[in-house]
Image: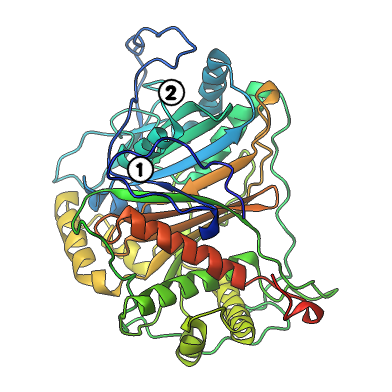
Amino acid sequence: MTAPHRGIGDRAAGEPETPDPGNGGLSGVPGDGAHGGGTGGDGHDAPRPAPAAPAPRGPERRIPFPTVDEITRHCLTDDEPETVHVEIHLPSRPEPDRLRAAFAEAMRRHPRILMREAPTRWWRARYEWVLTSEPDRDPVSYPGGTLEEARRRAIADCPSLDASPPFRAEVIEHDGRWVLLVTINHTALDGPACLRVVATAAELYGGADNSPAPPPVRKPARADGTEGGHADPEPSTSHWTRPARVAADTLHPGAPGNGMLIADLPVPARPPREPGKPSAYTVNDQLLVATWIMVARWNRLHEQPQRPVRITMPVDDRPRTMEMPIGNGTRLVEVTFGAEERELHDTLTAPGAPDRAAITRMLRVTSARTRALKAADRPQLGFSGDLLTAPVLPIGLRAAGIRTLRNAAGPWASSTLLSNIGRIPYPLDFGDAGRAEAVWFSAPGRMPRGLSVTTVSTGGRLQLALRWSHARLDDAAGNRLGALFARALDSTAYIPEDQEGEGR
């Protein structure tokens, strides 16, 4: 494994060291809430005057908050901002005026991203988005400072919903190259939707075709939700069973904010696909099993009682074309591991390399479960989410009820969130500024889970972002957990039978 982005800034006194390359090539980002220099000059451009007041507009168009937006809005806290961070690494510096013009036009072509929250009162039936014809603020800036400082801002400083658009795009120099770092308010939209707008901006900036690649062809699912040739999975763990929680490991319990770890890993190998048959399992299934191993081993090291691991997984069925709906468009499903995790727990969490036969069994059963979950037709947050946001009570009363239910149901929340974006479908070609060399996403790591795992695949590599709540893990513990994930993922890689037993 390699870590091309290590050495992103000097370690401040008292901050934990990031792991060395022997720990998997991981680069830590302490998330102590320090914002760094977010508004100063970039050392390349003259300071720009404050934007003029927006011109008078016609009647505003308003739309009610969808279910996901409303529940997220009800559960916001100051301690753990609801941000998604996306960073795109480019070989050369984008020219500021051209980039601002490209983003301005991209937002006009995707007008749903031009939104702000309408002022409201507790007795109203709905929160509402105001769709603006033009942005209220320029989202593009060249703030100067280090990439480490920008990453800290991305997990600590959420773009306000009081002005459109609900994201900011910072351009930062790093080791002679350039990073476009986008911070998104997750109440308004998710990472894939914002990336669609960035891809349009790249095409407008550089003139290169940034049309999405066609999605991979998969064997159609049967009526029961599984692909041909795969038996139905055995019944999974009951949702009434309290799941495992990542064991707390921190010298500062109750600390606010998130920490984050960035890593560049190899994509684990898979067995060759037989002609006319579906793949035995996907990289997403390998990520799920690796996450299970990470949590189970971590908890065994911390002498926690054995509990079932449940992983929340977003599923995104939206097209990646210009017609892609902008907003929070994923639906959440929960992946469980059933009888296999009980039977194989000791084998897979024992010291040393995990047993390959046990891992293969976990992968194949997990593959059958995820196929069935992806094929199921259900609302984004399940039927309970739609029920909780039905406008039969004022939003103030619904907010109090939803927060109370969330706190009460906290012990039954899943163990962690795994968001696998998969292959980036766009070239993200910025013309003379170059094509994206790597892309990272990170999702919020809020309590009660306190941990999120987000992965992206570009250029045959896997970009991993591990993000945790400081109430559960300090940065040193988060770095160790990331190294454990890297080893777990490596253990899921396919090895031909004639090479088993050889050194890896």
SS at mark 1 in the image: helix
Quadrant of image for the C terminus = bottom right
Q: Which three-letter amino acid code belongs to the residue tagged 2? A: Ser
Q: Is 469 placed left or right of 315 in the picture? A: left
From the top left corner, tell me how far across and down residue 245 is, in percent.
Answer: 32, 72
Choose mark 1 or mark 2, whichever is in front: 1
Q: Nearer the viewer, residue 232 or 175?
A: 175
Relative to residue 114, is residue 482 depicted above or below?
Answer: below
Give the CA separation, mark 1 to mark 2. Answer: 29 Å
Color style of the picture: rainbow
The tally of labels here is 2
Sequence-wise, which precedes: disc 1 or disc 2? 2
Relative to residue 315, is residue 321 depicted above or below?
Answer: above
Q: Which three-letter amino acid code belongs to the residue tagged 1? A: Ile
Q: In this view, which residue lies farthest toward the right?
A: 275
User: Which quadrant of the figure has residue 143?
Assistant: top left
Residue on which the image places disc 1: 155
Numbered circle sitting on residue 147 = none
SS at mark 2 in the image: loop
Quadrant of image for the N terminus = bottom right
Q: Is 236 placed left or right of 300 in the picture? A: right
Q: Residue at the location (62% across, 38% down)?
A: 322
From the top left corner, tell me how far across and down residue 223 is, in percent.
Answer: 64, 79
User: Which quadrant of the figure has residue 247?
Assistant: bottom left
From the top left corner, tell me how far across and down residue 114 is, in percent.
Answer: 43, 30
Q: Nearer the viewer, residue 327 or 97?
A: 97
The answer to whether marks 1 and 2 mark residues whose Cβ atoms lie closer than 8 Å is no
Q: Is residue 139 in view from this perspective?
A: yes
Relative to residue 428, is residue 106 depicted above or below?
Answer: above
Residue on which the image places disc 2: 133
